Image (cartoon, coloured by chain):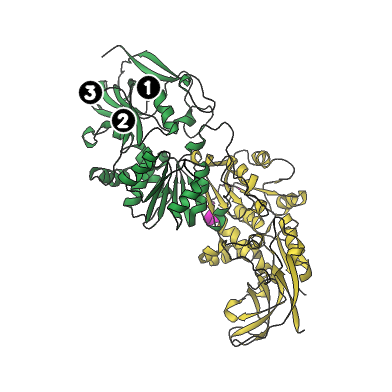
Chain colours: A yellow, B green
Amino acid sequence: MTDTGREVHLAERPHGVPTVDNFRIVEAPVPTPSDGEVLVRNSYFSVDPYMRGRMNAGKSYVPPFEVGQVMDGGAIGEVIASESDALPVGATVLHRYGWRDYAAGPAEAFQPVDPTLAPTVSAYLGALGMPSFTAYVGLLDIAEMRAGDAVFVSAAAGAVGSIAGQIARLRGASRVIGSAGTDAKVAYLRDTLGFDAAFNYKTAPVAEQLKKAAPEGIDVYFDNVGGDHLEAAIGSLNRHGRVAACGAISVYNATEPPPGPRNLGLIVGKRLTIRGFIVGDHNDRQQDFAREVGGWLRDGSITFQETVVEGIERSPEAFLGLLRGDNIGKMVVKLHD
Amino acid sequence: MTDTGREVHLAERPHGVPTVDNFRIVEAPVPTPSDGEVLVRNSYFSVDPYMRGRMNAGKSYVPPFEVGQVMDGGAIGEVIASESDALPVGATVLHRYGWRDYAAGPAEAFQPVDPTLAPTVSAYLGALGMPSFTAYVGLLDIAEMRAGDAVFVSAAAGAVGSIAGQIARLRGASRVIGSAGTDAKVAYLRDTLGFDAAFNYKTAPVAEQLKKAAPEGIDVYFDNVGGDHLEAAIGSLNRHGRVAACGAISVYNATEPPPGPRNLGLIVGKRLTIRGFIVGDHNDRQQDFAREVGGWLRDGSITFQETVVEGIERSPEAFLGLLRGDNIGKMVVKLHD
């Protein structure tokens, strides 16, 4: 063990598309845990689309990152020093201290997980973690998906979308349709994840492709994208259709307010519901999620993939790549073997 | 009784703002009721904003009017000939045969009402009828308004909005805010209907005026208007806020698809719900409505006003005036004393 570790700080706030100059890798002394605290060496940390919003100033549903401070967020590692009876050295723990080699804090801020239940512990940042839980809550509670519904998922090869589509299939959707931004992702959706139809939104207008992929319309739209995807979905939604508004990656870098869907007026006649949500409000569903999705992961009904970028120094790049759609499945940064 | 009566036909479909040339007043023989049928002489018929959508071709939630046919819709009158045991001559009945002096049809198509329960029978087209029921369902079931909510209503001096605002007050809203298009209407909302705040949306941007009128934000928005009202409401909605999307009169005459709210992305972080509805789906709530709102009307807790246009020949004008906002409260066409 060395005396210092690296941290990723927000160097400055981006205007529009972020660049690597917005981040700074900083060498910092490894903290010493005080009474009741533990010291953790991280194995992986998470880069997520919602972090783009936190790079801006101003309140959102999570506080913004602060300039000159570490980018916090989901991370997983091992306890290497403990001043708490609650967490022994060697425990694998999930926490929110984010983009750094070492993290220290009160034992309560670290959630022990069983590393033997996952192929790699990084799964606790993705398929066994927040993104999957987001898919579960969004699809079942927010969009109230029922057996027989035709379900459309955007950013369907991403960490959330890839699980949402599979849950839809396993919960008896009549048809699962996904959109993604490369032909390789489209093939992955159809051939590996079992989507009934999938299309590359970059090759033709979304509305047109969605109509072809779902000739009888859709009942549920799981929205990770916003913009023309949302407009197309509103156009294809059947009477009493529901939208779970999870994110809008298509407009996160916009410098001007983007126009909303031109066909929003259809929500009256079609009796549509569009509902935004934040997964953190739904922790009462955590056990249902662990039981149901955990079971599907264990028996292979749900499969997942990760895009692993190695080296903390490449984490800004990894994040920028995520916003461009370079990932298939969950994107994580790996810090050491 | 004469041998003929007048009917209003759709002469041609409008492009953009309708004109009187889109309508034709036609003289037609008074029908003779067959077995099981009744003949009704209308006292009033209803002109409603949703009828603008029905002037266009193409499917909507109600079938379009047909060129060369009578404009159908809500009307009330008296049975003057009956070939049915179910409805005697003299009964006051509500029906959907619309813009005409005389209507005949099967007795089941006519709903008898008690004329002594209303100041004038026209109330069955407004405060005791579909528009009030729309306000009730939209506010309580769709927007799930609860005591303590701050409630914003647009087109608040109209048939639906004026009742929605009063129900909100009586159901314990912390604050009721209304918008309308003239200073006289704004005064009516504040001085007669008991709104806590009201503003004229034509004198300054809606978002700005709404922020002033509801400095602590709103929890519910009852949307009759769409457009910049909806955008302003999304901006002012508090976390977990709800929108009942009832109509969008601001865009009914648009010839190009209008842009949606530029701030729709806020629905995620704020956990907003926007839900469209059609009152006809909610007939199971009719009895609750009659009991609760009927009671408030009888004891004077809810007041209402009507804008009465006399003479079937002026009905196209009445309808065009409604779309311009010439009415306070429900607009009806009166056919005879």
Whether the residues at callouts 1 and 2 have beta carbons within 8 Å, the answer is no
Between discs 3 and 1, the one toward the N terminus: 3
Visible in this render: residue B63? no
Disc number placed over residue B314 in the picture, else none: 1
Q: Amino acid at mark 2?
A: Leu
Q: Is residue B19 above or below residue B222?
A: above
> Which mark is nearer the camera, 1 or 2?
1
Q: Closer to the camera, B120 or A21?
A: A21
Does residue A280 appear to the left or right of B286 in the view shown?
right
**Does B137 appear in magenta?**
no
Q: Tell me where the magenta segment starts and ends, as one range.
A: A140-151
The residue tagged with tag 3: helix, strand or loop?
loop
Residue in view at x 43 percent, y 50 percent: B143
The residue tagged with tag 2: helix, strand or loop?
strand
Q: Assess disc 2: are there few (<14), some (14-19) or many (≥20) residues with their C-alpha within 10 Å of its C-alpha.
A: many
Residue A40 percent coordinates (x, y) = 68, 80
Estimate the spatial distance between the alpha carbons at disc 3 and disc 1, rounded to whole Å: 28 Å
Q: Amino acid at mark 3?
A: Val
Estimate the spatial distance between the alpha carbons at disc 2 and disc 3, rounded to whole Å: 14 Å
Disc number placed over residue B89 in the picture, else none: 3
